[in-house]
Amino acid sequence: MRHKLRQLRVDRGISQTFLAKKLGFKYSSGYSNIEYGTNRLSYEYAVIIADALCVDVKDLNEENTSFFEEKLHITCNKQSA
């Protein structure tokens, strides 16, 4: 997923600092740690990032993985209960 995040960000000319501020981080390292895989990407942050990159959350997902589908399913089930 981190390769996809970087690719989408760079393709759109968006800086790590911009996304860090969108996520509420004080420093750009808050976002860069997500992009480089040091920190896990939460679903809530994924929604914010997808909005900033003008893509659907599922578009952040790397091919052949189902991270967001599983998370979305879990999130929807919790909200329904």
Image (tube, grey):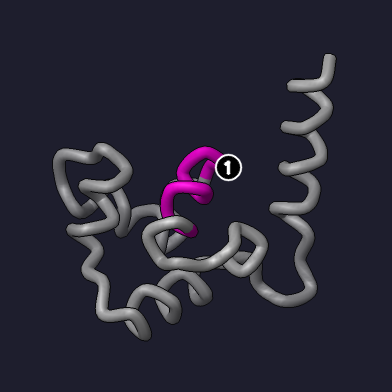
Label 1 element class:
helix
Q: Which residues are magenta?
A: 42-50
With respect to residue 8, does 41 lie above or below? above
| Residue 67 among those drawn in magenta | no
Q: Nearer the viewer, residue 33 or 49?
A: 49
Q: Going by the image, does 76 lie left or right of 8?
A: right
In the rendering, at what x and y percent does residue 37 appear? 46, 58
In the rendering, at what x and y percent does residue 6 appear? 40, 74
Residue at the far bottom in the pictured view: 11
Residue at the far top in the pictured view: 81
Q: Going by the image, does 78 lie left or right of 24?
A: right
In the rendering, at what x and y percent does residue 42 appear? 54, 41
By secondary structure, the bulk of the magenta-drawn segment is best described as: helix
Q: Going by the image, does 72 lie left or right of 52?
A: right
Q: Nearer the viewer, residue 66 or 40?
A: 66
With respect to residue 31, does 73 lie above or below? above
Q: Quadrant of the C terminus?
A: top right
Label 1: which residue? 43
Please name the residue shown 40% across and 62% down the image. 35
Q: Quadrant of the N terminus?
A: bottom right
Question: Around disc 1, counting alpha carbons within 10 Å, would you say few (fewer than 14), some (14 to 19), or many (20 or more)?
Answer: some
Q: Nearer the viewer, residue 59 or 63?
A: 59
| Residue 43 among those drawn in magenta | yes
Residue type marked 1? Tyr
In the rendering, at what x and y percent does residue 49 appear? 43, 55
Please name the residue shown 25% across and 50% down the image. 20
Please name the residue shown 52% across and 75% down the image. 4
With respect to residue 50, does 40 lie above or below? above
